[in-house]
Image: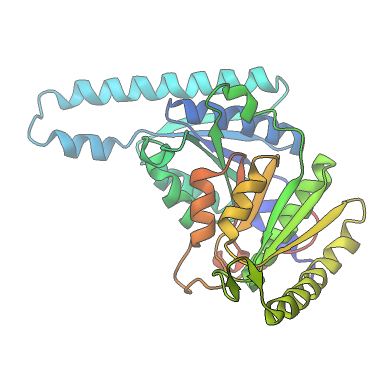
Amino acid sequence: MTDQRFEDPHHIATAKVVVGVDGSDGSWTAVRWAAQFAAERGRELEILHGMDLVGNSWVLGDYEVIVPSVIDAVREQGREVVARAERLARSIAPELRVSARATTDTGRQLLIEHSAEAYAVVIGATGNAGTFTHLGSTLLAVTAHAHGTVVVVRADSDSDADATTHASGPVVLGVDGSPVGEAAIAAAFTEAAERGAELVAVHVWSDWNSGRFAGHTSLGEINLDNVERVILAERLAGWREKFPEVRVAEKVEVSAPAPHLLSWSKVAQLLVVGSRGRGGFAGMLLGSTANTLVQHASCPVMVVHPLDDLRGKRAGGRH
């Protein structure tokens, strides 16, 4: 576990927390969460809004006479969204350094490009249908293709503010045993230390219900369970030494990682997972578990991409 974080563009002093906004309820929740997060980490907050002017012009086709007025309206709406987001961020953290801008790019293009040097990219979703809203339509694309850390924040159905003040409960880490998960472990320990929270490391060693019948557990499964507990302890040992102040609870489950982590998300203040699972194909940028969690978890989900995805750099160490 070599400390190479000085080479990591996401953790240099100038790296910003980036948040995408589009005027939806989910994006306002994301701004609140991102402003608080940036203030607590001593980072500048950058608010981005993609107007997708090329797409809007293409949709209008041959109606060239009305295109200029429509584009003007889109630009004005973009300025209003950005201005409201900036006011909201400053109301959450008055001393926060904030920059904001709207561009002609699509939201997903804008956020993916800026993720290369961002401390974290924050994106919002609304309810369980978040992936079908305007900003939500980019949620999976950004989570899959962005570099570094992406945080998906869902608006609470009763009170948007609840999603920004999720200050109680543990930080929950999904440990899958794959090499790409090391960056997620580092991020989870860092978050638990910053928040003074307990870290619950949940390791699910099978993606299917092997060895189970009528509620019984086989002897082979018990032996495997013991082996997996040792493996989990070994994976966390170095990080425990690096973060001695973090209380760690280790949980080993037999199968189905997504349901276990979704259950933990109901009491957690943050859920941390790697972008790809142990069984993912090399070209699969977002694993099935991460995919499920960002759409349905009850707390903010931090998806951590390995630095190998960004020109061969590696993750590790405390920032």
Query: Is 44 positioned to the left or the right of 130 in the image?
Result: right
Residue for point 67% across, 21% down: 92
Q: Number of labelled discs?
A: 0
Q: Is residue 89 above or below residue 9?
A: above
Scheme of image coloration: rainbow
**Quarter of image, res 308:** bottom right
Image location of residue 2, percent across then percent down: 79, 71
Residue for point 57% across, 39% down: 18
Query: Is 186 positioned to the left or the right of 249 in the image?
Result: left
For the residue pair 270 and 61, the one nearer the viewer reads as 270
Whether residue 170 is visible, yes or no, is yes
Q: Is residue 167 above or below residue 79?
A: below
Residue for point 81% across, 66% down: 236
Query: Is 102 positioned to the left or the right of 262 in the image?
Result: left
For the residue pair 275 and 203, the one nearer the viewer reads as 203
Image location of residue 37, percent across then percent down: 69, 35
Whether residue 12 is visible, yes or no, is no
- Quadrant where the N terminus lies? bottom right
**Quarter of image, res 277:** bottom right
For the residue pair 8 and 295, the one nearer the viewer reads as 295
Image location of residue 62, percent across then percent down: 7, 34
Image location of residue 151, percent across then percent down: 59, 44
Q: Is residue 159 above or below residue 316?
A: above
Query: Is 84 positioned to the left or the right of 261 in the image?
Result: left
Outermost residue, left side: 62
